């Protein structure tokens, strides 16, 4: 029986529009692709899209917003690749177009595929993880947080609900699953807030040895219309110790992760 290898890739791609046109590049076969490429270990996706567009197109760009986060699985004999792709709106700030990059009418290129991420070999004990997290609130304005369990980096700190996506799982589906597992809540996603990146080159978790850990997080706004008493429903070994609702005025006294504190400060509507 043939063994199938599974791997995951995180990519950042630029959507540059101008006067009804979109910027694309042609690969060696002449097919159109959105410019972009792989997020390197420890690299913020915003930095990645600026870097890869410079490499692919010769242009310097500025990122204006995160447009979407999409997932696909590419299957070839003996290999399945799960791609998490971040799509950014960008604008050109300098440079000149090389021959393989061009502007095409948006209406004439409705199915421009995303450029495949180039293969790469990662060093041992190096992990790049893609996750989806939510700024979760209820009708009373309370915020749902989850506490990191002992044995995990950041143990004891309170974090936004969410976690790494499973193989073949979209960010939205992954977040709603994590919300149910970590806190026994049923929510609805209302808004895409942004993206963050965290890098710890010597994170020590349950494995007991340092791991070069890089996480890329997509953040969403989530509403729980009918909140219940939070309960961790994940099995033994979960990275979540407990979950709880907090009134906005209580958050100043809570020991938050840096990512949670940033999202709450920038996006919580008082």
Image (cartoon, helix red, strand yellow):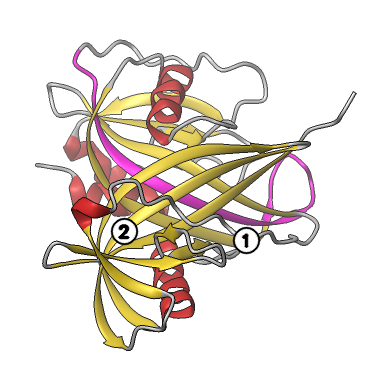
Give the residue number, with chain letter if any, for mark 2. 88
SS for dot 2: strand
**Residue at the right extreme, as displayed:** 1
Residue 88 visible somewhere in the drawing: yes
Mark 2 or 1, closer to the camera = 1
Residue 256 visible somewhere in the drawing: no
Of residues 104 and 176, the one nearer the viewer is 104
Question: Is the stretch drawn in magenta largely helix, strand or loop?
Answer: strand
Instruction: Specify whether 167 is left or right of 51.
Output: right
Residue 219's x, y, as percent?
Answer: 33, 44
- For the residues labelled 2 and 1, say whether their Cβ atoms are less than 8 Å apart: no
Instruction: Specify whether 104 is left or right of 212.
Output: left
Instruction: Specify whether 4 is left or right of 43.
Output: right
Residue at the image point whose x is 39% and y is 23% from the top: 176
Q: CA distance from mark 2 to mark 1?
A: 19 Å
Q: Report which quarter residue 268 is drawn in.
A: top left
Of residues 8 and 27, the one nearer the viewer is 27
| Membership of 220 in magenta stretch | yes
Residue 72's x, y, as percent?
Answer: 50, 38
Residue 116 position (above or below residue 47): above
Give the residue number, with chain letter if any, for mark 1. 118
Residue 42 position (above or below residue 240): below
Residue at the image point whose x is 28% and y is 87% from the top: 94
Residue 214's x, y, as percent?
Answer: 58, 56
In the image, the segment drawn in magenta is 203-225
């Amino acid at each position: 029986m043939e063994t199938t290898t599974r791997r995951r890739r995180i990519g950042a791609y630029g959507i540059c529009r101008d006067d009804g046109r979109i910027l694309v590049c042609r690969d060696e076969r002449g097919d159109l692709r959105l410019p972009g490429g792989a997020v390197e270990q420890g690299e913020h996706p915003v930095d990645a899209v600026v870097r890869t567009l410079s490499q692919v197109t010769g242009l310097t760009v500025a990122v204006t917003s995160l447009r979407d986060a999409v997932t696909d699985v590419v299957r070839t004999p003996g290999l399945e690749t799960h791609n998490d792709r971040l799509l950014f709106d960008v604008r050109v700030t300098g440079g000149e177009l090389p021959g393989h990059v061009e502007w095409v009418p948006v209406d004439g290129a409705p199915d421009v595929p995303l450029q495949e991420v180039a293969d790469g070999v990662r060093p041992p004990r190096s992990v790049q993880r893609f996750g989806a997290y939510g700024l979760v609130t209820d009708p009373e304005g309370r915020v749902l947080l989850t506490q990191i369990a002992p044995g995990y980096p950041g143990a004891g700190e309170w974090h936004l609900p969410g976690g790494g996506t499973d193989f073949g799982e979209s960010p939205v589906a992954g977040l709603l699953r994590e919300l149910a597992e970590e806190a026994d809540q049923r929510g609805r996603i209302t808004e895409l807030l942004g993206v963050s990146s965290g890098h710890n080159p010597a994170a020590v978790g349950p494995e007991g040895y340092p791991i070069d850990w890089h996480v890329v997080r997509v953040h969403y706004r989530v509403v729980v219309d009918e909140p219940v008493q939070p309960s961790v429903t994940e099995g033994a070994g979960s990275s979540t110790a407990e979950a709880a609702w907090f009134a906005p005025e209580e958050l100043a006294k809570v020991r938050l992760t840096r990512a949670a504190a940033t999202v709450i400060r920038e996006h919580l509507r008082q």
